[in-house]
Amino acid sequence: MTVNFSSDNETPVASAMMEAIVAANQGTATAYAEDAWSGRLDQAFSELFRTEAIVIPVSTGTVANAIALATVTPPWGSVYCHQSAHIQNDESGAPEFFGNGLRLVPVAGSAGKLNLDSLAQSMLATEGHGVHSYLPSALSLTQSTESGTVYTADEIRGLCKFAHQHNMKTHMDGARFANAVVSLGCHPAEITSEAGIDMLSFGASKNGCMAAEALVIFKQPQWRETAERLRKRSGHLLSKMRYISAQLLAYIENDRWLEMATHANRQAAMFAQAVQGHPHVNLEYPAQANEVFVRWTSEGFTQLESQDIEFQRWPGRDDLARFVFAHSTTDEETQYLIHALG
Amino acid sequence: MTVNFSSDNETPVASAMMEAIVAANQGTATAYAEDAWSGRLDQAFSELFRTEAIVIPVSTGTVANAIALATVTPPWGSVYCHQSAHIQNDESGAPEFFGNGLRLVPVAGSAGKLNLDSLAQSMLATEGHGVHSYLPSALSLTQSTESGTVYTADEIRGLCKFAHQHNMKTHMDGARFANAVVSLGCHPAEITSEAGIDMLSFGASKNGCMAAEALVIFKQPQWRETAERLRKRSGHLLSKMRYISAQLLAYIENDRWLEMATHANRQAAMFAQAVQGHPHVNLEYPAQANEVFVRWTSEGFTQLESQDIEFQRWPGRDDLARFVFAHSTTDEETQYLIHALG
Amino acid sequence: MTVNFSSDNETPVASAMMEAIVAANQGTATAYAEDAWSGRLDQAFSELFRTEAIVIPVSTGTVANAIALATVTPPWGSVYCHQSAHIQNDESGAPEFFGNGLRLVPVAGSAGKLNLDSLAQSMLATEGHGVHSYLPSALSLTQSTESGTVYTADEIRGLCKFAHQHNMKTHMDGARFANAVVSLGCHPAEITSEAGIDMLSFGASKNGCMAAEALVIFKQPQWRETAERLRKRSGHLLSKMRYISAQLLAYIENDRWLEMATHANRQAAMFAQAVQGHPHVNLEYPAQANEVFVRWTSEGFTQLESQDIEFQRWPGRDDLARFVFAHSTTDEETQYLIHALG
Amino acid sequence: MTVNFSSDNETPVASAMMEAIVAANQGTATAYAEDAWSGRLDQAFSELFRTEAIVIPVSTGTVANAIALATVTPPWGSVYCHQSAHIQNDESGAPEFFGNGLRLVPVAGSAGKLNLDSLAQSMLATEGHGVHSYLPSALSLTQSTESGTVYTADEIRGLCKFAHQHNMKTHMDGARFANAVVSLGCHPAEITSEAGIDMLSFGASKNGCMAAEALVIFKQPQWRETAERLRKRSGHLLSKMRYISAQLLAYIENDRWLEMATHANRQAAMFAQAVQGHPHVNLEYPAQANEVFVRWTSEGFTQLESQDIEFQRWPGRDDLARFVFAHSTTDEETQYLIHALG
């Protein structure tokens, strides 16, 4: 048996979403997001987030992030984000591309989270020189973070308030948003629209969908035009959008998305507990969502690999590895991993 | 009964492709096109086109076109295309976006086809002024054309030869490529790689796939790097690419793609024949693939609409409408339409 | 003696402007357009155009045009211009570059002038398809035109009104603006701000300055920020801007700019009159400013060349040539040319 | 008397260059850098740098830098530079604009200089993730640095070697290049072409020219096309380029540029010596060129200001100020400043 904790990107589509795809495959439907499924998204997400929401369905988180940032940032504007952010390290400059040369400013902060101090310090160092400098335009937070940690509602509120005071818009990269909601046990609105987030990249592919994500814009209907133009112009307006929209509807129906994330987080927690009880293995960061970062000897990791366990050795760090748990991870797989720790 | 001839974009996914998606949905698979299905594409398409082919799977034809053109055209380069081309009229500037401000030069030509004369004349009018002018860099042909016509292999060969002589690369927008191959009764290589086409946007979504297209690069392996960078940077490198690649493999397996296009073309031909036999209705262009452009009175079209027949009234032309036939069009639907002509 | 009618781009700097440069060269001055000369431009041009004007001094007409268009046009917006416009044919895509892939739409029209009919027809053919099309965003007129003709105030008013009704902003490329003002004998405001022009590329280099142009924005102070950001970001915010601004002030002082254009136009008129009186030579367009387009035999032109007369043979037209007259053209030179006609 | 040590950007044009401008102002000259002065630049700079040099005259250092970097860096490429670099902090994203979204990576290093360790560490942290990361493409060094220090020839050689080993091209921002050459007492080639620099932004405006800079490309004639296209497309191909080129020729003639820099450096050295002899004032960095960074109390600086001395208080640092000495600084002014220190 090979067990795979490499990434929730590698998981199959959950059955409910596959059924939604098949159900949507009846007869013709108007192309280019003018179909009935796409037409229900705004209403469904407005209810989910208890506020006015505009939904732009797309097929990747990268494009959701890039459209969001380019919608509110001029080419001479800067976007502040944690130095470990996906937009900074893993998107090959998609924000810079969509934003026609906007600049990301990586901000330090422990455990994957920037904070008021590090943000203020970074702004001081990079702006204030008129047309010679970039114009601070947006703040992007990742929730849950790239370190498997989670911002509290208070932290988000404080950061958003600071951003808005400095004329910046706020974005949340929610590639693993469901895991954060479950971790905090809060309502999804409490850490987004009600905390000052203007735009959310609502991730779904990692938690059971095929290639379905949504850019959700809160209370800013005037941004729709730009976001939709960017989607079309970047080749992301699928003619057969119904298959993405149908997944998104099934995903949020009856708290299905939270159930799947609950499952994933629970697997991660079981493993994290085992790590904490182990004499030679340690957690690198608090395990608050579905990713667990483990510090161990290189030999320790090699021994796991020899038992057909897949996970990610961290680049440039012999002593660090990441284990990701997903909607499709079984108890048996997690127990196998725990057992293999020795 | 409502019958829909508006666009092959509105059709459902054919069962073979849906089955391929479900079959691919087993267990985990490496993300970002490093899966087994994606890994078989180069070989499969090299065999299909009897030459070395690099395949870049993507989810829309627009992005396939945009990556292709941006791969071979500098920001100060121009791309010649027919004035009715999709890249010119229907992609909101995706080529200009991916190509950082490259320019499309629309070229005249009857029945949706540019020709050596109109191309040469257009080049004469737009280049030759050193750094002050755009640099002619690419020629893009649409096959089958936006008028439902088809370039012959000889025409393509002549145009590609001219383009290469002028240091331009050649691209084919094959959103309805299958319909052209079937129409000509030729081997797909005869009107692409063997006729001088360097890159093909191989359409599949209109002919039975969900959101699956491929940029196929012939004999130019050095273009892979740029094309793959552009795909990633534009947010088009799906983490779960296996679902697109599995469709593409099923699509070309056992000539399935040609069977479906044969069906679509046959429906179109039946309708075209009826039009030709009708005393007051006329074909605007020769009906050579799966689109039929019909000239009639506005009242005539209104009468069809009143019988729950959907099709596209042509913008700015009261007397023109387009009827599109697809893999999913039934004989019954076509007969209903023919009967409705009166 | 060699006499040069090739282009007013090739002329020397007039003495008044050279003196202004030397006069500005005293002691230090704050850099980046914060100097005293630059600080007087807004006021001086507001008086010149009898309305609120923002002045962005730059060193080329190309950048003035590009900043103007990019300030009011989104990347998915289109700019309508005459098919002979400098922005279309001679700027290597500067508008597309500054505008991040905006599109120019060339419009037909005789004698270098587009008109309401050709503009409306062009718009009908290129827009109206929602996010799939470019969004008509600006109209750019060239005054005097690339054919040496001049739009009347009425024509400009009509075109601007149409543009504004269609939510487009209006720009005038005034590389030879002085020649048009003199030709019409009007106040400069009558064919710009008072006729509905929002932005003017106020040319000066061709009419006696060294490398001094200005983008003038009428009654839209909110555009200043974007225009100044674009100037800086494109490397056009000179540290020593005083030398450009001092020229511009000297240029418009005491109608000096109009005097110089009057001289140039007069030379052109003398030549045009001679052409009209010649049995075998003809004017291609009415000679209304300082450029004269002449239709003759290739042999005729060769004979002029053999007399050390320089001018521009028109690309692709054996029977056409352009003669440009400038502030520095002497009566003797013009008489020499007239005499050489035979 | 007001004395100005704010910036060498604020100085007047030296008389030799003003005379060159006046001398070039005779009769007509072919436009767009096809004049006789521009035509001599390649040869003159090839001699100056004892190797094949291509010279692209422009009017600002920002555009020289931006063209250089965009010539060798794809949109998905990154440029490593010191965190204090002008391209990073003072050009409003010109490199990102010209480079269509390339990314600058700021690198740490004391006294304005990056080093092999900090560069290697920065690269390790930012690349190596295939298409998901930016591709390291160029290294940009500033000479003399933004801290008034100077890289030795050995340091440059080591950094260039490392860069080339990692497939990066090398650029030097030489806004104050003359001051560095004088400081090191070396031949200009020893710290550029012969040390591995591929492209030099050769600054002249700060050291006596009006608005004259040059991008110098060493031994890479194939880059000319791209650099010239970028110059045109960004509106920097002046029609009357002769006035820039004539200055550049006068500037390097008879070591004039080095004489002027010698004068400026000498003034700076006198002041630095006074600072070092002062009991309460300190140098922040070694004063190796024409900029002196001084650490003192805020009250101390205020006292200087009250004596009509202008200089730059450093943003965010009460205890730091910059004094810049130029070709036009007089002994009297420097002595006045020294005396004012108390």
Image: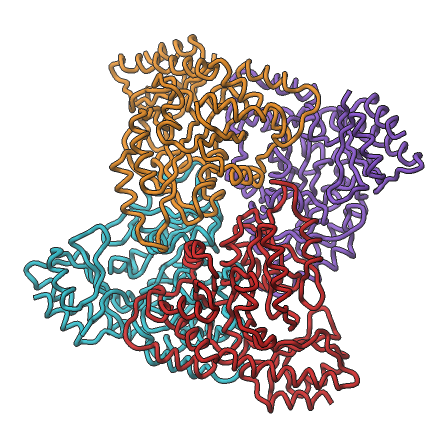
Chain colours: A red, B cyan, C orange, D purple
Please, is residue A44 above or below residue D76 in the view?
A: below
Q: Is residue A210 toward the left or the right of residue D219 in the image?
A: left
Picture quadrant of residue A119: bottom right
Name the residue located 61 percent from the left edge and 17 percent from the top edge: D22
- Does residue B131 appear anywhere in the picture? no
Residue B105, position in %: x, y?
36, 46
Residue C294, position in %: x, y?
32, 22
Name the residue located 46 percent from the left edge and 39 percent from the top edge: C92
Residue C257, position in %: x, y?
47, 17
Q: Is residue A226 toward the left or the right of residue B225 in the image?
A: left
Rendered-image quadrant of the C terminus of chain D: top right
In the image, A304 versus D180, the foreground residue is: A304
The residue sitting at the left extreme is B279
Q: Is residue D63 toward the left or the right of residue C337 in the image?
A: right
Please, is residue D40 above or below residue C265 in the view?
A: below
In the image, A216 versus B326, the foreground residue is: A216
Rendered-image quadrant of the N terminus of chain D: top right
Name the residue located 48 percent from the left edge and 68 percent from the top edge: A49
